[in-house]
Image (cartoon, rainbow, N blue to C red):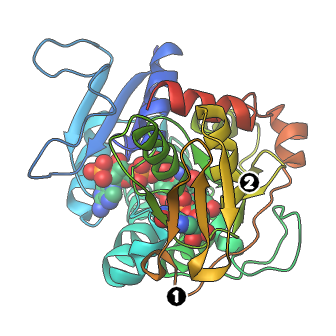
Amino acid sequence: MKKRALIFGITGQDGSYLAEFLLKKNYIVHGVKRRSSSPNTERIDHIFDSINKKNKNLFVYYGDVTDSSNIIRIINQTKPHEIYNLAAQSHVKVSFELPDYTANTTALGPLRILECIRSLNLEKKIKYYQASSSEMFGNTKEKPQNEKTKFDPRSVYGISKVFAHHITTNYRDAYGIFACSGILFNHESPRRGPNFVTKKIISGLLRIKNDKQKYLTLGNLYAKRDWGHAKDYAYAMWKMLQGKKPNDYVISTGNQITVKQFVSLSAKRIGIKLKWKNKGLKEIGIDQRNNNTIIKISKAYFRKTEVDDLLGNYSKAKKELKWKPKFTLNKLIDDMVANN
Ligand code: NAP
Ligand code: GDD
């Protein structure tokens, strides 16, 4: 019998890679997409087509994690062996503008799914994956961060993810659900949303190189992140649900650089020689080919409270799941450049 997986957030970056991966593993994949006024299935259109049935093992349903009624219906209808909850309002800065909606989706969404599993008496039948985040570590002084590092979140998004993380542990302990949280550090890909910094930098630099844009405006250049590739991280999600016991795992690369270093490295790989000048809001990046200012800074992109320093220790995943990242940072950037 084929395994069945249900993915909340299948239209997102990670959901699309996970769906591809599970289909290759011969799963029947069910996915939940939100209703939107214009198409939001761009990332899965190559594998899904409701009319011509490009893939007979992939099914997509309208749903929303802010509404329990559809969650019950879809779980009942699809009878999944594994649920991956990747649905979230996932942008940290936007969470300051949409606090109520972010908490409703990112914190209460997982509670609704877990509560459906419990109320349908499916505790022993469904394995559950929760998309936890390194953003939960926030302002911690511990470095690198591991599964035991104390959370100190700095945004509505981070705080919502801490709630979701704890509620997942609680449903595992209280009701015996095989529930795992992957504490994933930043991961990127050609499918990354355009308003996350890596995608914004690479798309912007490519447009500048091709004379389609004059400059790129960024915020805090000095935050440090541990950036990996979404393909490697989707594989880790699946690995967690194949373990003997449910557990939580940090997934990261173990390397970090600043946003500024990411700009310089990307520019170099794209063939732009960049020189930095000035400090603070006056800091600029100059294209040495023509002396044009191609990087500017604006207050508009700074966060009210920032997370300065994220670096993950993935030894537990390496030991117990035999997981390690395949993509180096250079390979990640090259993939994003080649498939922008
Ligand atoms: P993403 O590209 O923003 O995808 C989020 C997905 O959630 C999209 O499919 C989105 O639908 C869906 N969604 C949003 N609100 C929803 C709602 N109310 N009901 C149902 N679906 C909803 O994010 P991602 O980068 O793939 O990340 C996947 C998950 O991992 C998220 O939970 C994120 O917070 C978490 N995470 C991400 C990273 C990272 O670096 N990428 C790191 C740690 C944790 P639309 O396509 O219609 O918007
Ligand atoms: N988005 C954005 N846009 N960020 C900028 C910009 C800009 O113009 N300029 C500087 N930054 C800085 C942010 O202040 C932050 O410190 C860093 O770049 C990374 O920002 P994002 O790419 O937006 O990612 P994030 O780290 O806030 O959140 C991502 O990673 C989390 C895991 O730690 C998201 O994918 C979250 O969903 C995820 O949980």
Mark 1 neighbour density, 10 Å: few (under 14) some (14–19) many (20 or more): few
Considering every residue shown, the one lying at the far front of the view is 290
Residue located at (53% from left, 72% from top)? 219
Mark 2 neighbour density, 10 Å: few (under 14) some (14–19) many (20 or more): many
Above or below, 323 relative to 295: above
Q: Position of residue 122 (x, y in %)?
A: 45, 48
Question: Residue flagged by tag 1: what amino acid is it?
Answer: Lys
Front residue of 276 and 225 = 276
Q: Position of residue 186 (x, y in %)?
A: 63, 53
Considering every residue shown, the one lying at the far bottom of the view is 304
Compared across the picture, whether 185 is left or right of 4 comes to right
Q: Position of residue 91 (x, y in %)?
A: 44, 65
Residue located at (69% from left, 69% from top)? 223
Mark 1 secondary-structure assignment: loop
Mark 2 secondary-structure assignment: loop
Whole-Å distance between the Cαs marked 1 and 2?
21 Å
Question: Residue flagged by tag 2: what amino acid is it?
Answer: Asp
Residue located at (91% from left, 39% from top)? 319
Above or below, 54 relative to 144: above
| Res 328 seen here | yes
Q: How many marks?
A: 2
Front residue of 267 and 40 = 267
Front residue of 133 and 322 = 133
Above or below, 65 relative to 338: below
Q: Position of residue 94 (x, y in %)?
A: 39, 73
| Res 165 seen here | no
Q: Which residue is mark 2?
A: 226
Q: Which residue is mark 1?
A: 304
Ligand 2 sits in quadrant:
bottom right
Q: Is mark 2 within 8 Å of ligand 2?
A: no
Residue located at (25% from left, 57% from top)? 64
